[in-house]
């Protein structure tokens, strides 16, 4: 699996999940439950991972979420 997004922003994460779902791309959110360790202070970013074959489509779907 390849990382397509890393963020501490829960709104950006939710929006990215929505966009990937609408595009029909399976994804996995890594580090979603790290908040149990960090105490919900938001210092550990969550990562969205997709299959390597879906990477180009996922990057296209998320192009407007995080410039660059």
Image (cartoon, grey):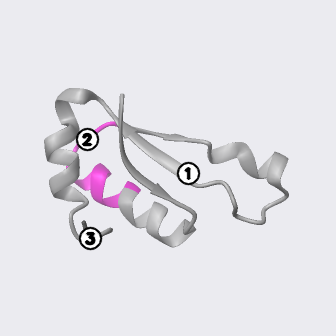
Labels 2 and 1: the sequence-earlier one? 2
In terms of image quadrants, where is residue 67? Answer: bottom left
**Circle 2 or circle 3, nearest the eye:** 3
Q: Which residue is mark 2?
A: 25
Separation (CA) of disc 1 from disc 3 = 17 Å
Q: Which residue is mark 3?
A: 67
Q: Please provide percent x and percent y for residue 46.
A: 56, 51
46 left or right, relative to 22: right
Badge 1 is on which residue? 46
* Residue that appears at 78% across and 62% down: 40
The kind of secondary structure element at disc 3 is loop
First along the sequence among labels 1 and 3:
1
* Residue 3 is inside the magenta segment: no
Q: How many residues crowd around disc 3 within 10 Å: few (fewer than 14), some, or many (20 or more)?
A: few
Mark 2 → mark 1, Cα distance in angstroms? 18 Å
Q: How many marks?
A: 3
Q: Magenta segment range?
A: 17-26
Locate residue 62, reporting x and y percent. Answer: 25, 60
Q: Please identify, in this view, whether the residue under mark 2 or under mark 1 is nearer the observer.
A: 1
Extreme residue in the front direction: 68
Residue 23 painted magenta: yes
Work out whether mark 2 precedes mark 3 in sequence or the reverse, and give the earlier one. Answer: 2
Vertical placement of residue 51 versus 65, above or below: above
Using residue 10 as the reference point, say whether residue 60 is left or right of it. left
């Amino acid at each position: 699996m390849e990382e397509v997004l890393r963020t501490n922003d829960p709104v950006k994460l939710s929006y990215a999940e929505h966009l990937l779902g609408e595009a029909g791309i399976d994804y996995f959110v890594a580090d979603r439950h790290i908040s149990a360790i960090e105490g919900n202070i938001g210092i550990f970013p969550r990562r969205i991972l997709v299959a390597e074959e879906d990477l180009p489509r996922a990057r296209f779907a998320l192009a407007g979420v995080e410039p660059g």
